Image: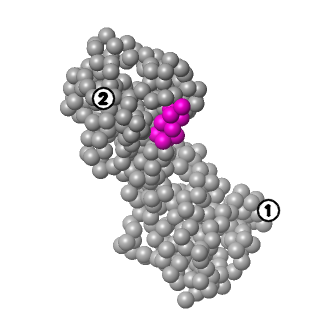
Amino acid sequence: MYKVGFYGGKFMPFHKGHLHCALYALGECEKVYVVLFYNTQEEKTILADSSHCRFDPKFLNWRLRMLVIQRELAAFPNVQVVAIDCDKAHDYALAHGVDDWEAEARLVEENIGRFDVCYSSRPEMDESYRRAYPWAEHRIIDRDRTIMSIRGTKIRTSPTMESYYLLPRTYQHLLNKSVLITGTESCGKTTLARKLAKFYSTSYTDEYGRVVCEEYGTGQPDISIYPEFLYGQKMLEVKARKEANKVFFCDTDAIVTNFYARLYEHTNIELAEYIGRFSKFDLILYLEPVGEWVADRLRIHGNPEARKKNDDMLKAMMAECGVTNYHILRGTHNENYLKAIQLVEEMLRV
């Protein structure tokens, strides 16, 4: 058992191989420092050349990388995550005629002090570690990459979602794609959301307003209830994102809630407009009311003229909120289902 261990890297991004090394180190040390090096010259070069980085750069922001590491290791009291700005190391290297690696080693010692052991998964770096930290043993974890055969370079040069299962759950939460399924009443939103969730083995949200209306036994609750619809819907989205498997499906949104407020209460909810304007979905599927209208105790606009008028009204409200980039589905249930799968697959390939 070592007293203090050190495990560092750029972690661009922090993948399951990195997580495995950190967890292994935790089992051998009373305390482990996991050190994120950011603003390295290599990092700047990677981010400056988009042709060599197909992984979405917004997920390589150093603060986000830091948060991912902290969250993944938060359950372990003997770990401390530290970030080191390597701009300072580069300046030191230039001033003292040493390489960046040696300068970074000095910053490590300044920030965490000396340690008994340093960890990596790279045998080819053994001499560099021994030169930088001559007082510490260099332990190579998973030398032959038999447990986690992952390379950060491979992740960065591949489309973002291709690396989904190589990343820890915190990163997966961030990468999960959202699909909004919207439209007026009896257009098939709920059925399609549930079908797609089943097909992709993932999560979806119910239409929260409908759930509440069923509790009250009416499709026209008092306007004072509408804010609950908005808050409840967003919380369902947060939950669905955390539980998702690459993609999750949202049955309706704040704009639809406001649509019903205008339709039934002849009023506009500013909060709904705000949420609708600033909610961002990766894909929006708009179902037109062309299929058979299914009556239930919450639906009252079944004649063709009313359905067309309401459809036009909802599209206009979406435009008011700046939501214009959506795909219209106007086929049968199965045609819409197959088209939705096609669009989701296209989105996941980016």
Q: Which residue lies most toward the bottom here? A: 1
Q: Quadrant of the N terminus?
A: bottom right
Please state which of residues 244 and 133 is positioned toward the viewer in this rendering: 244
Tell me the chief SS of the magenta region. Answer: helix
Q: Which mark is residue 95?
A: 1
Is 137 positioned to the left or the right of 193 in the image?
Answer: right
In what element is the residue under mark 1? helix
Please tell me which residue is depicted at 24% across the width and 26% down the height of the picture: 294
Q: Residues within 10 Å of mark 1 (few under 14, many from 20)?
A: few
Q: Nearer the viewer, residue 200 or 316?
A: 316
Residue 129 covered by magenta stretch = no
- 96 up-or-down from 178: above or below: below
Q: Give the residue pinned by disc 2.
A: 297
* Amino acid type, residue under disc 2 in the picture: Arg
**Residue farthest along the front direction in this orientation:** 217
Q: Amino acid at mark 1?
A: Ala
| The C terminus: image quadrant | top left
Q: Quadrant of residue 131?
A: bottom right
Position of residue 327 relative to residue 247, above or below, is above
- The stretch of residues the image draws in magenta is 224-234
The location of residue 338, given as percent across then percent down, is: 23, 34
Could you tell me residue 122's position as x and y percent?
Answer: 49, 72
Distance from Cα at disc 1 to Cα at disc 2: 77 Å
**Are dots 1 and 2 in contact, CB under 8 Å?**
no
Q: Nearer the viewer, residue 235 or 214?
A: 214
Q: Quadrant of residue 68?
A: bottom right
Disc 2 is placed on an element classified as loop
